[in-house]
């Protein structure tokens, strides 16, 4: 298999530090050597490549941008480049790392007690524990404020009741960050897999993110100790702040998926001959390639700027929404065009384009749909919320 060189039409590399390039190249080599040979098999079988978790941990990918408790504390651009390279392999792997880092380790780091941080952060970073994030419910997706999961105060702690749906890593998680309504508003809880009354099952039949575990979680009179509460969580703002962290990584990840598609479509159309010459020599094919190069270059510059803003504390939720919305949208458009350029072969899993295209359909929906990000930006620029 060819090793991947990426696309860098505007010499964006020159704006990266040596450390950022080194991180990117390390993950790129990992994906070439250890992900590409196995990912189509996992995608076909609809299984998550658990065997890669120890390697992803060893390479420092889990919670890579968080600090303290032995965590790497990489800057936002280096972290983004990890997400980009992983999603070049498969969106399922990037989803695993996003959930573990941005949706489980981040809330523990930002809102957890000292004991919770000491217990979970090193274990989650080392891949010795796996986490999931339960916000979405069967009847409440884009509008999590309508959630019906409840945590009621008891003499010794809390009693949790409700159902969460579409939860990445749900059945493989040792600990679930669960968001529930309490008398004081929405709060987060750490629920361990052994908790009595807690059950989970996988959602099967997905045509997207097949190499990722997606589950339903059910809580029936689950008794939690007071220590299960993430004490710093207060209102819907808390889970939304976690989503901002994850959306930031997704904006970078989408570039990786789109680069994989571009790379494959370019190589394929240069080799494939129809009407006596390579497909790449036809104007209509070049138009598609030019679209890919131009949208990818814009997406790269957007993310690099957003990453620098994030390190300056200026990456607002709306700015992150813009990058997630734009980059996933163009990546999906690139994947659809790439699939078309491979003709019948584009419909087969011997090639990557179809897998990335299907994955990106789910990535466009999760972590705030494209339309919800449009409304977030609309509210930011007008001051008028148009959600309801
Ligand atoms: C593979 C996968 C993994 C996931 N992992 C997780 C996870 O780990 N944890 C978790 O909590 N959730 C997870 N999700 C859930 C995901 O975040 C939700 O699917 C998403 O928020 C959308 O919610 P919904 O599916 O209920 O769609 P809905 O909210 O029902 O939306 C359906 C459509 O209506 C549109 N719509 C909704 N409201 C409006 C409005 N006000 N104006 C205009 N249009 C609107 C939407 O844009 C969309 O097009 C995952 C989903 C998938 C597919």
Image (spheres, rainbow, N blue to C red):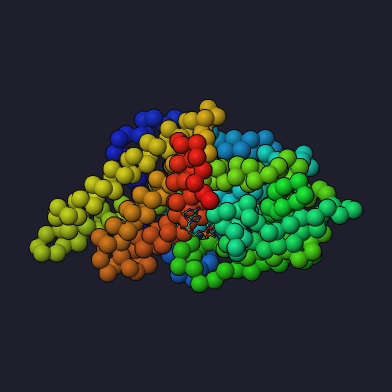
Q: Position of residue 42 (x, y in %)?
A: 49, 66
Q: Examine the rendering and report whether any part of residue 19 can be seen.
A: no
Q: Nearer the viewer, residue 14 or 162?
A: 162
- Residue 205 visible: yes
Check the image and report above or below for 19 versus 117: above
Left or right: 46 in relation to 256: right
The residue at the point 60 percent across, 64 percent down is: 138
| Left or right: 237 in relation to 37 | right
* Rendered residue at 71%/42% (across/down): 234
Q: Residue furthest left?
A: 276
Considering every residue shown, the one lying at the far right of the view is: 155
Tell me if residue 363 comes above or below residue 311 in the rendering: below
Based on the displayed image, in which of its 4 quarters is residue 339 positioned? bottom left
Above or below for 18 versus 154: above
Residue 283, horizontal then vertical, whole percent: 14, 52
Write the residue at 61% across / 48% down.
Answer: 103
The percent coordinates of residue 74 (x first, y second) are 55, 35
- Answer left or right for 222 relative to 286: right
* Residue at left offset 35%, top offset 67%: 350
Residue 308, image x, y percentages: 47, 30
């Amino acid at each position: 298999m060819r090793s991947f060189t990426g696309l860098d039409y505007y010499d964006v590399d020159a704006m990266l530090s040596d450390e950022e390039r080194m991180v990117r190249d390390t993950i790129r080599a990992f994906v070439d050597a250890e992900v590409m040979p196995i990912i189509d098999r996992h995608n076909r079988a609809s299984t998550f490549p658990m065997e890669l978790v120890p390697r992803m941990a060893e390479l420092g990918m889990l919670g890579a941008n968080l600090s303290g408790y032995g965590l790497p504390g990489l800057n936002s651009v280096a972290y983004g480049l990890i997400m980009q390279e992983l999603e070049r392999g498969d969106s399922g792997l990037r989803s695993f790392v996003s959930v573990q880092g941005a949706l489980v380790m981040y809330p523990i780091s930002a809102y957890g007690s000292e004991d919770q941080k000491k217990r979970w952060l090193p274990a989650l970073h080392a891949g010795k524990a796996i986490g999931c994030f339960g916000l979405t419910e069967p009847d409440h997706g884009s509008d999590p404020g309508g959630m019906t999961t409840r945590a009621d105060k008891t003499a010794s702690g809390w009693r949790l009741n409700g159902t969460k749906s579409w939860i990445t890593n749900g059945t493989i998680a040792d600990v679930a960050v669960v968001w529930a309504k309490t008398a004081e508003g929405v709060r987060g809880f750490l629920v361990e897999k052994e908790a009595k009354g807690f059950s989970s099952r996988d959602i099967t039949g997905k045509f997207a993110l097949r190499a990722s575990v997606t589950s339903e979680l059910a809580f029936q009179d689950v008794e939690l100790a007071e220590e299960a509460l993430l004490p710093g969580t207060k209102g819907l703002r808390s889970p939304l702040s976690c989503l901002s962290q994850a959306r930031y990584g997704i904006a970078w990840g989408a570039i990786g998926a789109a680069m994989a598609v571009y790379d494959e479509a370019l190589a394929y159309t240069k080799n494939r001959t129809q009407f006596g010459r390579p497909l790449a020599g036809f104007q209509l094919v070049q138009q598609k390639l030019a679209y890919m190069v131009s949208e990818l270059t814009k997406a790269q510059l957007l993310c690099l700027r957003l990453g620098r803003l994030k390190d300056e504390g200026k990456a607002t939720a709306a700015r992150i929404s813009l990058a997630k919305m734009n980059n996933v949208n163009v990546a999906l458009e690139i994947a659809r065009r790439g699939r078309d350029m491979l003709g019948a072969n584009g419909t087969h899993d011997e090639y990557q384009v179809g897998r990335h295209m299907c994955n990106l359909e789910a990535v466009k929906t999760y972590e705030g749909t494209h339309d919800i990000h449009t409304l977030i930006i609309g509210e930011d620029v007008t001051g008028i919320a148009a959600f309801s």
